[in-house]
Image: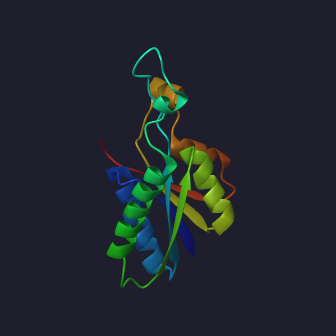
Amino acid sequence: MKILVPVDGSKYSVEALKTAVNLAEKFNGSIVLTNVQKRVVSRPKSMEFDVEEFIEDDPDTLRDRGRKLLDKIAEQMEGSSFKVEKCLLLGDPAEKILECAEDHKPDMIVIGSLGLTGVRKFLMGSVSSKVVSHSPFPVLVVKTKK
């Protein structure tokens, strides 16, 4: 059983990872750790600005940040009974998680959720909701208490 797990370092992704690890151990599976770095756009610092002033992080910085997170998590899993792969992408988290899933063809995606409800969920959407809606693969959403 191949399990794709999006991780971002939040407590929500840590809980999803714990669930994925339990499944991988029980079913002799493997895990694809996935991290998506999204460029942040901000306000210009002055009225005279360059387009790059809107961008908080350059792609190399983002890749480095994502690589460090994936390496740290993979290192903690060394010696496990299952294989660990890593997938690092830049862009919209939901779109890139689905892209990684298409590339790796997992049996399941295990993803954490903030548990947004009502108007906040409608206005903000959520990565997990988008993945559930558009994934051709089964998705297990792990909800965590705030």
Front position in the image: 103 or 52: 52
Which residue: 58% across, 64% down? 108
* Quadrant location of the C terminus in the rendered image: top left
Determine which quarter of the picture holds residue 19: bottom left
Q: Position of residue 106 (x, y in %)?
A: 62, 68
Outermost left residue: 146
Which residue: 55% across, 60% down? 109
* Res. 126 in view: yes
Seen in the picture, residue 14 relative to 53 is either above or below; the reply is below
Q: Position of residue 54 (x, y in %)?
A: 48, 29
Which residue: 50% across, 80% down? 27
Outermost top residue: 47
Seen in the picture, residue 18 relative to 28 is either above or below; the reply is above
Front position in the image: 60 or 119: 60
Q: Position of residue 131 (x, y in %)?
A: 59, 48
Seen in the picture, residue 25 relative to 146 is either above or below; the reply is below
Q: Position of residue 4 (x, y in %)?
A: 54, 64
Seen in the picture, residue 22 relative to 133 is either above or below; the reply is below
* Quadrant location of the N terminus in the rendered image: bottom right
* Res. 141 in view: no
Left or right, 131 with respect to 120, comes to right
Left or right, 10 with respect to 37, comes to left
